[in-house]
Each structure stands twice: as C-alpha cells, then as structure tokens.
C-alpha cells in the first residue's frame, strides 16, 4: 500500500515535502504529443514501454493519444496495467517459471496479451499454461539483433521457433521482437544509425527465412528513445517501444544528433525535489536525497537550473551538491530540483508522482497526485 503522499492537490511547490518525485506536467504533455505526432506522421504504431513510468494513468494518456497499447517487462507490471484498464499489453521479455506463466495466461482471458520467447522449451511452457487457463497467447520470437542479451539467432533458428509456435493450438505467432537496448545510449548519431542498420539486417534475414517456410512476421517491434527515428525509417519495423521520452533523464541528454549537438526533441519532465539539510560550505551542500531517492547506474543526477553545480557522494539518505562553480548557492532549508541520471529505476524508488503545473513560472503548484502503481512489480 502506498505511503502518504508528500503533497496535496493545490499546494504550492514550495510546500511539497521531500524527497519527492515531480513531473513537470507542461513538459510531460508536450513530450507525449511530440512522440504521438511523430508516430502518426511516420505511419508506425507506438507501443510505449510502461517500465519507465509504472503507471496505468500515464499509460492511458498514451493510449488516448494513439498508442496501440503498452509494453511491460514483468508479469506483475502487466497485471497492474490490465487492472488499470489497459487492454493491449506486450510483455517484451521472456517468462520462466510455472507461477508466472499461469498468471500470464490467466491475464490473457481479460486482455490481449503478447509475450516473447527465444527457446523451444519456452514455447512448450507457454502452450501448457495457455491450455491450463483455456486462453490464447500472442507470441513473438525475440531475435538477438546485437545486444547479446535475450534472443534466438536471426534467420533459420528464429524461423524454426516461429514454426513451433504456429503449431501450438493455444499460441499465435504474432511477429518479432527486435529491440537493441544498448544502442539507445550510444552518443554519436552515426553510430546509433549503424547499429540499428545491423538490427534491420537481422530482421530482413529472419523475414526471408520465415518466407522460405511460408510464414511472415506481421509485427516487428523494438526501438527506444535513443533510436526510434532510425527504426521508423527502416521500412521493417511496425511498432516503436520508446519509453523514456516522456520524462527524459540526464543520461539521454548526452546523446547527440546528426549535427553533433545534444538531441533536444524531448524535454526534461521528471525531477526529484530535495531539501538542503545542511550547508557548511559552498562545496558541501547536503540534501535529503541519496541512493534511496535516485538510481545512479547511468550517472549522477544533475541539479536543475544551478549551472555549474554538481551532485556527488550519495549515501543512503544524503547527497552532496558542490555549488562552488554556480552563481546561485542554495542555503539550508532551500529546495532544489535534480534530473535523475536514469529515470526508470528512479521511478521505482518512489510511491507517488507529484504533478506540478507551471514549473517555469512564478507560482508553480500541485495539480495531480498519481501512485506509482507498479512500483516493486518485479515478479
């Protein structure tokens, strides 16, 4: 059960308790509209990844703007999405274990559920679970397009797996999962494009192998916030799985466009709001947000609108801002905004989103409170 929220609707931003996970609603809504418009113009379906936000409320906003459904990474995330009214969910991952498989198959009696597989035993286990639940599961073959994580080899091995799915009475072969995760954070645009070109070649090889046995992948799904334009232009992808575009984190801000400048299509819309607990020196402003408020696997959070300030040395409940190079130096009791280094796992550390309207104006205030409903949904 979520803890009490750090704010109430109508409250001035300055009164929000900390640490708090804030959404700049104006920037967030612009991000939603930009990706929705891109997918419409490109003629490609949008299936955003809900592991970014873990919120059926946000997922519903994406569907309202034209998304065909959402992706999830875990069965429990999919359950939260379906419970929240999302009718089309792709579990963009493999599932092992009878308990999870049984839950997934039961969920398919309430919504359109698709799942990925990369092993013949996985196909057999999915079929057994679907038989037990008297349900139909849509199944995609995940191919390794270069990420060296999950995925069967492209070409004939993938086609053989698809054929096995097609022979399973309670399973429907729906297409290919061709997501290249590590390409998302390659900084140079040309290299990102080259990696997606490699993925496209693997998809074409697999489509050819499927064609040789009279089959075709109607859905080819993948892409992320770092490469979605490349997949959309490829002519082989039919769905985009970008997720982080709604929030944008500090790590994605390091990606460069074709002109060598940072990509700025989407805006920072997710922040952690923190209080300066102690200010013994300009190089040591201690805030109440540490490792339990931020994920730092992709780098430290970045102080917002404090040019030159650096966050470092986080511990469980403390973080330090070095403001010696900043013209503005917060004092004890002041509150600061920080852009997380990695939005997805940062979200999973909080119970509530505090939606703030007018963050760039003189009197920002709380407009909405949304639970992070799938927080901790790891199983």
Image (spheres, rainbow, N blue to C red):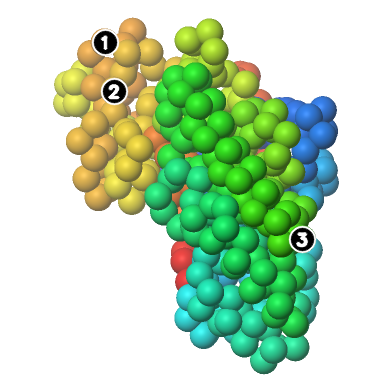
Residue under the point 76% across and 34% down:
39
Q: In this figure, which residue is indicated by the disc labeled 2?
A: 310
Q: Earlier in the sequence, mark 2 or mark 1?
A: 2
Please name whichever residue, 10 or 302, is drawn nearer the observer in this view of the structure. Answer: 302
Residue 374 place in picture, x, y as percent: 56, 62
Write down the quadrant of residue 161 in the picture: bottom right
| Residue lying farthest to the front in this orientation | 212
Q: In this figure, which residue is indicated by the disc labeled 3?
A: 214
Q: Residues within 10 Å of mark 3 (few under 14, many from 20)?
A: few
Q: How far apart in space, not on screen, are marks 2 and 1 (Cα)?
A: 9 Å
Residue 271 place in picture, x, y as percent: 49, 35
Write down the quadrant of residue 365 in the picture: top right
Residue under the point 82% across and 28% down:
41
Residue 56 place in picture, x, y as percent: 68, 57
- Secondary structure of the residue carrying tag 2 is strand
Instruction: Classify 75 as above or below 152.
Output: below
- Secondary structure of the residue carrying tag 1 is loop
Q: In this figure, which residue is indicated by the disc labeled 1?
A: 325
Instruction: Classify 269 as above or below 111.
Output: above
Q: Is any part of residue 195 visible from this angle?
A: yes
Q: Residues within 10 Å of mark 2 (few under 14, many from 20)?
A: some
Q: Nearer the viewer, mark 3 or mark 2?
A: 3
User: Seen in the image, is 62 located left or right of residue 158?
Assistant: right
Q: Earlier in the sequence, mark 3 or mark 1?
A: 3
């Amino acid at each position: 059960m979520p803890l009490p929220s750090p704010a109430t609707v109508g409250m001035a931003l300055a009164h929000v308790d900390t640490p708090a996970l804030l959404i700049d609603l104006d920037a967030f809504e612009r991000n939603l509209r930009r990706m929705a418009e891109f997918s419409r113009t490109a003629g490609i379906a949008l299936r955003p990844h809900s592991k970014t936000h873990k919120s059926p409320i946000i997922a519903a906003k994406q569907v309202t703007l034209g998304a065909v459904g959402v992706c999830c990474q875990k069965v429990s995330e999919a359950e939260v999405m379906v419970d929240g009214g999302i009718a089309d969910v792709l579990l963009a991952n493999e599932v092992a274990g009878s308990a999870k498989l049984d839950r997934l198959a039961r969920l398919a009696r309430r919504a359109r559920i698709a799942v990925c597989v990369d092993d013949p035993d996985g196909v057999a286990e999915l079929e057994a679970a679907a038989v037990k639940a008297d349900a139909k599961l849509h199944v995609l073959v995940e191919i390794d397009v270069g990420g060296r994580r999950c995925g069967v080899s492209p070409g004939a091995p993938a086609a053989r797996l698809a054929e096995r799915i097609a022979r399973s009475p309670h399973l429907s072969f729906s297409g290919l999962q061709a997501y290249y995760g590590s390409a998302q954070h390659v900084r140079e645009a040309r290299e990102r494009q080259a990696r997606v070109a490699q993925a496209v070649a693997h998809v074409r090889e697999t489509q050819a192998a499927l064609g040789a046995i009279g089959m075709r992948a109607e859905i080819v799904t993948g892409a992320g916030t770092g490469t979605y334009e490349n997949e959309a232009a490829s002519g082989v992808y039919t769905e985009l799985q970008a997720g982080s575009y709604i929030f944008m984190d500090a790590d994605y801000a390091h990606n460069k466009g074709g002109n060598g400048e940072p990509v700025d299509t989407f805006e920072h819309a997710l922040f952690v709001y923190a209080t300066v607990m102690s200010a013994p020196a300009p190089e040591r402003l201690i805030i109440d947000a540490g490792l339990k408020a931020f994920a730092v696997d992709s780098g430290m959070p970045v102080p917002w609108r404090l040019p030159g300030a650096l966050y470092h040395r986080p511990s469980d409940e403390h973080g330090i801002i070095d403001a010696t190079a900043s013209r503005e130096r917060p004092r004890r009791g002041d509150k600061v905004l920080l852009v997380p280094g990695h939005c997805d796992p940062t979200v999973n550390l909080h119970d509530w989103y505090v939606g703030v309207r007018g963050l760039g104006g003189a009197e920002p205030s709380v407009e909405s409170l949304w639970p992070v409903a799938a927080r901790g949904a790891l199983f």
